[in-house]
Image (cartoon, helix red, strand yellow):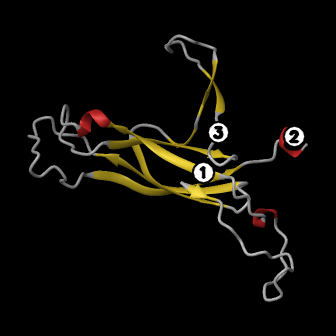
Amino acid sequence: MGTTPPTYPLDGRDAALPILRFVEDEYVNNMFFVAWGTADNAKSTGLSGVKSEASPLDLYYTRTENYGDTYVRIPWVIGGENSNEGYGETVWRYDFVAKGEPEQQGEAQLRATSDGSKAYVIWHSSIAAEEDPDEEYTRWYPWKPEESFENDLWFRRLIFWPTPEATS
């Protein structure tokens, strides 16, 4: 979770600070951002595979503008010939920071501007090695380091442009 950080008043009220006027410097205290990830929980229970921890899958985010009473969602049209019921229906869901297979995305960090108009996310992405189906799972040493490749740190900037209804 990332909150909007308070800033010093840079509008001339404090003679020791320079006078700067940026929109991002206006502190909005009712806003914060949340990022969370999904995980492959079946593998963490030992039912299949040899992992003791849930493997990360996708990362999602949202923000609130009213102290957490409601959270921003985006419209999503259900599509595709092989989709479940509701084909063509519009549903509201949370947007993603990163998703896709075979990549595993996790360990996100969030920072936001003071006015909440922008947020910055950094996360870890990797591809896990193929599991050996013949390897015996043991609870005595379940945290064996997992082999992976294409380990990268990714960065994304989220910008929230003002909407006409928000400015009027």
Q: Judge the density around disc 2: few (<14), some (14-19), many (≥20) Cα neighbours within 10 Å.
A: few
Q: Which mark is residue 118?
A: none
Residue at the spot x=85%, y=75% of the render?
A: 11
Q: Mark 1: which amino acid?
A: Phe
Q: Where does the C terminus fall, quadrant-wise?
A: top right
Mark 3–mark 1 Cα distance, whole angstroms, equals 12 Å
Q: Nearer the viewer, mark 3 or mark 1?
A: 3
Q: Residues within 10 Å of mark 1 (few under 14, many from 20)?
A: many
User: What is the x, y in percent for residue 126?
Assistant: 38, 50
Residue that mark 3 sits on? 70
Residue under label 1? 33
Q: Earlier in the sequence, mark 3 or mark 2?
A: 3
x 10%, y 36%: residue: 134
Residue 90, relative to residue 118: is it above or below?
Answer: above
Instruction: Write the residue at 81% across / 62% down.
Output: 23
Give the labeled residue for mark 2.
164
Dot 2 falls on a residue whose secondary structure is helix
Q: Quadrant of residue 5?
A: bottom right
- Tell which of 101 and 8 is nearer to you: 8
Residue 166 horizontal/vertical position (percent): 83, 43
The residue at the far bottom in this view is: 16
* N-term-proximal mark, 2 vs 1: 1
